[in-house]
Amino acid sequence: MPRRQGGIDVRLQATQRDGAEEAGLVARLRAGDQAAFRQLVRARHGRLLRLAGAFCRNRASAEEVVQETWLAVITGLHGFSGEAPLAAWINGILVNKAKTRAVRDGRMVNFSDLAREEGEGDAFEPERFAADGHWASPVRPWDALTPEREAGDRELLAGVGEALEQLPPAQRAVVLLRDVEGLESPAICQALGISEANLRVLLHRARIKLRDAAARLVGPA
Amino acid sequence: MLTCHQVAAGATDYMEGAAPPLRRLGVWAHLRICPNCREYLRQLSRSIGLARRALVAAPAAEVEDALAAIFAAHGQGAAE
Ligand SMILES: [Zn+2]
């Protein structure tokens, strides 16, 4: 049920597409195919680093966590069941490693405190709505956002990437885990040590900011 | 009747299926008659799609080579 009301079920589409190519990729990886492994590294490394950055306080430890993750992937490939998508399996390894490491180094970000701080105040600027609760000005449709741009406009997608980086830490962690990487809510709450209510507050604020950034990037029709 | 502000403020709960039944019905009824809120929720949803496809930096060539070397070494070890 989640994710349908907006009209586009992004996660399902992605899962179906990924599923078609995945069995072949896993078979090649298990056979030791170098090209397949390099393809996987190119597809996932930057995303893993971005995700690790949500847990670690500095770049160097994020890089080490990603390195440890790749080692675990390489040694664990034969035990990969294929029940979850490959990317989800790798993300799960990364989240565990990142958390273990952050705790060990005494640098675990306290997401529960951050959730409280980042959740304070109204999620919207006051000028956005009139006193009677209506939109102060109409929500302008994204006529300029064609399906082609949505899928492959590099400038737009780079801009959205920057907007992700600029989110406050807990909002960034939550939106990366949930919306970008597609982890289930209970797993995210457990990894970050926050409640489902915290999760939704953070997600909401992150999505509002990303939508505002996207609206600026999409531009007028 | 819910206001646009209330609908926008509860958009994530609604989209995540976490809104209580009465609130859910209220949002649904509001969306039927309010093109602004419909568009806003659609944009939230499309933003998620954009975030999924957001560009990230490619790994440096040395990083990719180093990982590929580990992968190759492990493959040889496993085959013996
Ligand atoms: Zn409305």
Image: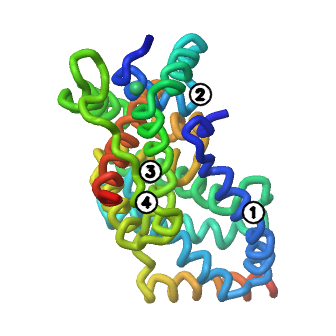
Chain of the residue displaying label 2: B
From the top left corner, tell me how far across and down residue B9 is, in percent: 38, 26
The type of residue carrying mark 3 is: Ser
Mark 1 lies on residue: A19
The type of residue carrying mark 1 is: Gly
Mark 4 lies on residue: A145
Say which element carries label 3: helix
Say which element carries label 1: helix
Tell which circle, 1 or 4, labels the residue nearer the N-terminal end: 1
Q: Are marks 1 and 2 on the same chain?
A: no
Q: Answer yes or no: do the residues labelled 1 and 2 have beta carbons within 8 Å?
A: no
Name the residue: 40% across, 68% down: A63
Mark 2 lies on residue: B17
Q: Is residue A143 shown left or right of residue A190?
A: left
Q: Nearer the viewer, residue A61 or A5?
A: A5
Mark on residue B47?
3
Is residue A144 among the parts visible in the rendering? yes
Mark on residue A36?
none
